[in-house]
Image (cartoon, rainbow, N blue to C red):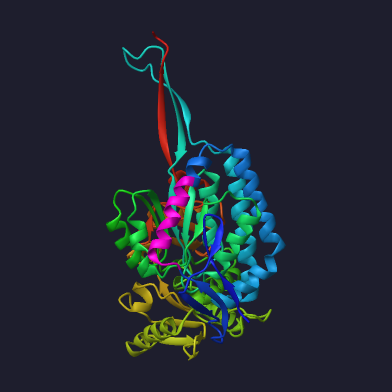
């Protein structure tokens, strides 16, 4: 019988009359049952979070660090259980689910270190003008208070960790709304946090449907919103909450440029094939567009298609599965419609293009124009386009011909081209000689244009969850 999960408010697991089944995307079997609070109950989490923050905000850094390390230990003890729940709730292949668990542990470990060393302040000489003699300033960063974290379905443990860990490290309280499709791993993390001794009320988890969260967000006690999800929802959220600090991690159609003389063509082919199709392409930095120099285009394309065909599509619980299902039937229909539209308008199918339910074959297309949906919009599925280019500057223009700007990649031996790409490409990150899907937990991560505002990565998230405050001292009295 599937486990029933309560929602977490003020350190207590609560139940309601409103329950919802969570189903495995692969076979539609029920894998858990969640309790959904009503709006009045959800609003209570704000009071408890604010009360907990008032008690916690001046806690010594070593206590925050110790708690974060205990959370790492708790995840480690249940790491296989976490991996399997990621498979069951989200259809993530077991091998990549295990990687996500390791990454979540790293996220909390880095936060434990940052809790001890982060101050974000400095000592300022202020005697720079007449009348300011014997005055100096001290600045440091203070926690904001109550933070609302809203997380997506595709990395339901580690992207939750990127909300929870910096909030605890910086002395804030957090209310978490996990993705409606994949709340189970977040609720498990709540269990671990309580067992680690996290004070009551510092972490509250309310698995509300996305359309019901707005009345909670309107409360003035919520000082910051950290949102990861679709650009449509994210920008609407920002427009409604102009007096709060808001971080948006949104969509993308990440591009890779393969120069005419890359360091290793085989590596470029295999790495980008994995970057395009891991997580069934359901990542905002999955490889969606590739621009390959015309001199090596045919050779690269053969290798890339060969690497794509090696990927095993199927049951995500099997050890050797590389690509599992997309999250739901609506997503599958949307992705297949994009493929069909491209083919109807002259695109060439090199491999894939078929689906069985929510299992979509890794699909490679060429002869795709910039205005086709599989190029100009985020596919968020196992589809990649590959096109030739003649001049490096034209390839850079193609990368920038997008309303998104999250990450991009360039494979080249020429460091002049690498730095030109770094200076020219309009994204939050440019990856040299690796795929644009590269991310580790301490790096600044975020986008420009329609891909969002603000940065994650523990140190940078802590900055966004704190406020710089100055004290001026006058010794001339």
Q: Per the image, is 316 magenta? A: no
Q: Answer whether residue 47 is magenta in the image.
A: yes
Query: Which residue lies at the image location 55% right of the left edge and 45% below the top edge?
Result: 169
Tell me which residue sits at (33%, 49%) in the image: 220
Residue sitting nearer the eye, 20 or 284: 20
User: Could you tell me what secondary structure mostly forms the magenta stretch?
Assistant: helix
- From the top left corner, tell me how far across and down residue 187 is, in percent: 56, 65
Residue 294 coordinates in the image, percent (x, y)? 44, 73
To which quarter of the image does residue 336 belong?
bottom left
> Residue 429, relative to residue 389: is it above or below?
above
Answer above or below: position of 453 versus 318.
above
Judging depth in this view, the residue of 185 and 44 nearest the camera is 44
Is residue 397 among what the camera can see? no
- Image coordinates of residue 418 in percent, x first then y, are 48, 55
Q: In which quarter of the image is the N terminus?
A: bottom right
Pick whichever, 303 or 261, lies toward us: 303
């Amino acid at each position: 019988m599937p486990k029933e999960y309560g929602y977490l408010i003020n350190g207590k697991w609560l139940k309601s009359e409103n329950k919802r089944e969570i189903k495995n995307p692969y076979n539609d079997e029920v894998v858990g049952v969640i309790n959904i609070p009503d709006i009045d109950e959800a609003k209570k989490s704000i009071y408890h979070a604010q009360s907990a923050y008032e008690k916690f905000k001046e806690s010594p850094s070593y206590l925050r660090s110790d708690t974060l390390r205990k959370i790492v230990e708790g995840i480690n003890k249940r790491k296989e259980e976490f991996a399997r729940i990621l498979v069951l709730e989200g259809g993530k292949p077991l091998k990549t689910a295990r990687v996500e668990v390791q990454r979540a542990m790293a996220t909390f470990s880095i936060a434990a270190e940052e809790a001890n060393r982060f101050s974000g302040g400095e000592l300022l000489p202020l005697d720079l003008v007449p009348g300011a003699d014997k005055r100096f300033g001290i600045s440091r960063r203070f926690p904001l208070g109550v933070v609302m974290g809203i997380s997506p379905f595709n990395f339901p443990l580690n992207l939750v960790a990127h909300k929870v860990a910096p909030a605890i490290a910086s002395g804030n309280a957090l209310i978490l709304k996990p993705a409606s499709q994949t709340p189970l791993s977040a609720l498990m993390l709540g269990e671990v946090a309580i067992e680690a001794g996290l004070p009551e009320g510092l972490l509250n988890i309310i698995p509300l449907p996305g359309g019901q969260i707005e009345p909670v967000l309107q409360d003035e006690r919520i000082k910051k919103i950290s949102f990861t999800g679709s650009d449509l929802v994210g920008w609407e959220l920002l427009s409604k909450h102009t007096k709060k600090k808001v971080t948006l991690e949104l969509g993308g159609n990440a591009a890779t440029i393969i120069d005419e003389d890359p360091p290793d063509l085989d590596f470029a082919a295999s790495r980008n094939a994995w970057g395009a199709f891991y997580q069934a392409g359901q990542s905002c930095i999955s490889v969606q567009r590739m621009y390959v120099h015309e001199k090596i285009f045919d050779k690269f394309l053969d290798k890339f298609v060969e690497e794509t065909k090696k990927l095993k599509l199927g049951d995500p619980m099997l050890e050797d599965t590389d690509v599992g299902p997309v999250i739901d039937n609506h997503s599958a229909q949307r992705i297949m419609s994009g493929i069909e539209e491209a083919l109807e308008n002259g695109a060439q199918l090199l491999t894939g293009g078929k689906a069985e339910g929510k299992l979509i074959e890794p699909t490679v297309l060429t002869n795709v124009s910039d205005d086709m949906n599989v190029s100009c919009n985020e596919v968020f599925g196992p589809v990649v386009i590959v096109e030739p280019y003649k001049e490096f500057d034209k390839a850079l223009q193609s990368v920038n011909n997008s309303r998104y700007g999250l990450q991009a990649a360039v494979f080249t031996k020429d460091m002049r081209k690498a730095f030109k790409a770094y200076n020219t490409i309009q994204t939050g990150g440019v990856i040299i000689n690796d795929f644009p899907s590269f991310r580790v937990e301490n790096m600044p991560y975020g986008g420009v244009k329609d891909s969002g505002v603000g940065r994650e990565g523990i140190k940078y998230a802590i900055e966004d969850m704190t406020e710089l405050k100055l004290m001026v001292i006058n010794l001339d009295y």
